Amino acid sequence: MVIHGTDDEVIDFSHGLEIYDRTPITVEPLWVEGAGHNDVELYGQYLDRLKRFIDVEMPKKLTRSEEGRAEASGH
């Protein structure tokens, strides 16, 4: 999951977009409007998005991955 502040003064926002575009398996990114490089966690949507990623999206990805391995092994 890519999280990037739109006003990052250390790593330009375009780098976050590029990473997202080049990632083969993606989930919805979080572009934090107005956040810089070291303050993204101060924005409420950061914790909300991180929680959704951990509680919902990761378990789905893991389940799909386990199903794919079971099919490949013939189980």
Image (cartoon, grey):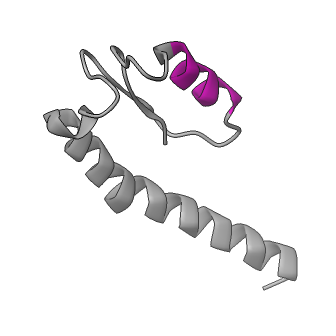
x and y percentages locating residue 14 in the rendered image: 54, 14
Q: Quadrant of residue 69?
A: bottom right
Q: Does the magenta stretch include residue 25?
A: no
Image-based side of 26 in relation to 9, left or right: right
Question: In the rendered view of the protein, which quadrant contains the C terminus?
Answer: bottom right
Residue at 67%, 71% in the rendered image: 67
Residue at x-position 67% and y-position 36%: 23
Say whether residue 2 is left or right of residue 67.
left
Look at the magenta stretch and give its main secondary structure: helix
Q: Nearer the viewer, residue 36 or 21?
A: 36
In the rendered structure, the answer to whether residue 33 lies left or right of residue 74 reads left
Return the x and y of residue 32 as percentages of the image width and height: 29, 24
Against 41, residue 8 (above or below) is: above
Q: What stretch is highlighted in magenta?
A: 14-22
Give the residue at the far bottom of this rendering: 75
Quick check: 2 above or below 35? below
Above/below status of 54 relative to 45: below
Answer left or right for 10 relative to 72.
left
User: Where, by quadrant of the figure, is residue 70 drawn?
Assistant: bottom right
